[in-house]
Structure formats: C-alpha cells, structure tokens
C-alpha cells in the first residue's frame, strides 16, 4: 500500500522458499495416483522437488506485476484473491488450438473462429512472433472450415511426457473482466524450442488432412458450447489425430 512495488519480488522469493508439509505431499500423491497420473516422487526426490518448485511458482505468480496492477486497476481486492493449482498431464502435442465459439471479429454467434499452431499452445497464447493458422466454420456445417490466414510462427514448442501446474484463482473469469493469463502455468520440465516448417506440414499441403483436423476442432468447440449453453473460449491440443481439451471458460 505504500508504493514499494519492489516488495512484489520479495514476496515471490519468499513463496519459493516454502516447504511442503508431509500431509500435503501425501494428499497430492494419493489424488494423482487415483487419477491415473504418474507421481513424480517415484522417479526420485529431485523429480518431486521439480514438481514442488513448479507449484510454488504458480502460487508466487499471484504477486507478479501484471496481475497486481491489473487487479488493482479494476479495484479487485488483492488480499481477497485465492490461488489454487490445477495438476494436468502434458500431452506432447502435434498441434495446439484456441477456439472462440462466437466469432470475436464479427460477433457472429453462428460462426466458430479458431487458431492452430504446431506444438504446444504457449506459442499461440504467449508472446511469440508470427501468426497462427486461422479459420472460421459455420456451426450448421462443421465439415466445411474456411481458412482465413496461413501460419508464420517460426518456433514450435515440444516436451517430454510431463506434468503442468496451472493457475486457477477467483480473479479470473469474472463478469465483465477477462483476467485469464494474469497468472502463470508452469510445466515440470522445460519445453524444447524447434524451428518449424509449415510449408511441408500436412496441415498446409494435404487438403483432406487439413479438413479433418479443422473440422474436429470446430466440432469440439460446438459440442462444448452446447454443453455449457453459452459462448466459450477453449484451449486444446491434437495428438495423433485426437482432440484433447485443456480448458474452457466463458468467452468475454
């Protein structure tokens, strides 16, 4: 409150020094194993410490600058914010996508708009140069996607089978306020940056493959919107032709 914003870094570093109570470790292990997920501790103490550090980095992101100033600007009480951590397996994606089930450019509710990149979705939602493949698709004709723009992303991100820890707070998805992306998602392992060549990719040069992939993305978006009964902002990946939805939230 006194304007010493350097304290934010000090708070983040303090969070990173937290030790995990044994009860928390045991509860997390039980939940992960009963969900069919691998337990990092089975690979040794160092792997568990990697996971615990990633969890703490998500918690610490409550005090990053962009989150602190963004919530302050809209008069959200920072002390009221609570941070949970979602634990998910990472799929080493062939492609990642973001779907808006109402076209955000035109406001057309009959039209799905989506973007697709090679590899993990961080190059799509993060500050990476270049553009994604973009397309629209009418909800009453999901098998006829229309490409709007071709990709120029020079980098794709790929990762070994791993776990990602994602933020989930009461400062996101609020009515009239799109707080998504303020807080951090932290993978246990570092992604590998690979130079990608879209010109040789079947998503570009194989019409049947392109139609199948884009239609499956549009179909997933349409199904999720019908399930929730409102326009959705959806993230997901494609692996071996299968669609995996990572998250969905109301479209702002």
Image: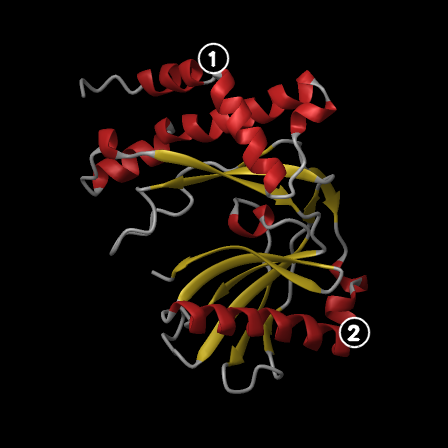
- The x, y position of residue 183, in whole percent, is 42, 37
Residue, x 48% and y 68% (percent of image)?
224
Q: Are marks 2 and 1 in contact (CB under 8 Å)?
A: no
In terms of depth relative to the viewer, which is nearer, 57 or 64? 57
Pick whichever of labels 2 and 1 is earlier in the sequence: 1
How many neighbours does mark 2 have within 10 angstroms: few (below 14), some (14-19), or many (20 or more)?
A: few
Q: Is residue 96 left or right of residue 126?
A: right
Check disc 1 and report its element: helix, strand or loop. Answer: loop
Q: Quadrant of residue 249?
A: bottom left
Residue, x 41% and y 20% (percent of image)?
12
Residue 129 in sight: no
Residue 105 in sight: yes
Q: CA distance from mark 2 to mark 1?
A: 51 Å
Dot 2 corresponds to which residue? 206
Q: Is residue 74 left or right of residue 170?
A: left
Check disc 2 and report its element: helix, strand or loop. Answer: loop
Dot 1 corresponds to which residue? 17
């Amino acid at each position: 409150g006194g304007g010493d914003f350097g304290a934010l870094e000090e708070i983040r570093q303090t969070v990173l020094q937290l030790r995990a109570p044994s009860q928390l470790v045991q509860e997390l292990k039980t939940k992960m194993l009963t969900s069919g997920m691998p337990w990092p501790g089975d690979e040794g103490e160092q792997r568990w410490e990697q996971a615990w550090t990633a969890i703490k980095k998500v918690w610490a992101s409550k005090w990053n600058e962009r989150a602190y100033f963004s919530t302050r600007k809209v008069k959200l009480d920072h002390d009221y914010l609570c941070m949970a951590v979602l634990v998910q397996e990472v799929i080493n994606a062939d492609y990642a996508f973001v779907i808006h089930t109402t076209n955000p450019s035109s406001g057309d509710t009959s039209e799905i708009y989506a973007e697709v990149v090679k590899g993990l979705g961080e190059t799509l939602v993060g500050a990476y140069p270049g553009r994604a493949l973009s397309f629209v698709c009418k909800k009453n004709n999901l098998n006829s996607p229309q490409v709007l723009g071709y990709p120029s992303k020079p980098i794709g991100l790929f990762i070994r089978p791993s776990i990602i820890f994602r933020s989930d707070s009461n400062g996101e998805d609020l009515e009239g306020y799109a707080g998504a992306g303020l807080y951090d998602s932290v993978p246990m392992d570092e992604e590998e940056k690979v130079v990608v060549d879209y010109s040789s990719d079947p998503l570009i040069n194989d019409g049947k493959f392109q139609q199948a992939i884009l239609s499956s993305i549009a179909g997933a978006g349409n199904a999720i919107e019908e399930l929730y009964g409102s326009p959705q902002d959806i993230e997901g990946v494609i692996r071996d032709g299968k669609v995996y939805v990572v998250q969905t939230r109301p479209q702002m």
